[in-house]
Amino acid sequence: MLRNIAILLLLVSLPAGFIAADGGADLDDENPGLMLRAFMISYPGRISEVNYDPEADDWYMVAGSTRLYWAKGRLLPADKLQDWSKWRPYIDYYYPEKVPDPDGFSEDLIKELKSQTLAESRSNSPTYNIAFYDILYDGRTRRRILRAGACPWPIRRPCPRHAGRPSGPSPRSPG
């Protein structure tokens, strides 16, 4: 118990700039134990352990009853570790400490930030391995999410958890 309190105090006392962008952040060089502890604090009761596995030479967290390895930010179960490069890291960018001034953006950066370029880039990038989300939300399919009562988007029929509350316009209704 004292160890958990000490870890929490350490995490809370870290300066905000520690995980801010420095222009060339490489997640392989960051502290995976700290990143996984941040997940543990963010999902209390869902993540029960963060530790290092010397046999796998990687950090892991236990979500539900499943051990998910850091795998360079991909949060993978042991049986997917050999294919880590197929998946997108969960934390693949950092927010800058200060909002950048658009007047200083180069023409190339402006082209990269256009919505069409961003959409093409996203469609060509690897997908997330959903094991982590599936453990947290039983969210492999929309039907399972709705059955569990988690409605993050408007739907035509409210799930039992949100019955009686407005859920927004139906996707097929005029308004």
Image: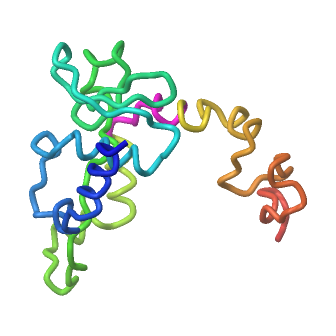
Viewer-closest of 30 and 47? 47
The residue under the point 21% across, 34% down is 72
Task: Pinpoint residue 111: horizontal percent, then vertical percent.
Answer: 24, 67
The residue under the point 15% across, 21% down is 57
In the rendered image, the vertical position of residue 172 relative to residue 175, given as above or below: above
The residue under the point 41% across, 28% down is 62
Answer with left or right where residue 172 lies relative to residue 133: right
In the rendered image, the vertical position of residue 93 relative to residue 150, given as above or below: below
| Quadrant of the image occupied by residue 114 | bottom left
Task: Pinpoint residue 13: horizontal percent, then vertical percent.
Answer: 23, 64
Question: For the view shown, which residue lies furthest in the front direction?
Answer: 2
Q: In the rendered structure, does residue 97 fall within the stretch colored magenta?
A: no
Residue range (magenta): 125-134
The residue under the point 87% across, 54% down is 163
Viewer-closest of 161 and 13? 13
Answer with left or right where residue 166 lies relative to residue 42: right
Q: In the rendered structure, does residue 129 fall within the stretch colored magenta?
A: yes
| Quadrant of the image occupied by residue 37 | top left
In the rendered image, the vertical position of residue 151 relative to residue 125, given as above or below: below
Task: Pinpoint residue 146: horizontal percent, then vertical percent.
Answer: 74, 40
In which quadrant will I find the C terminus? bottom right
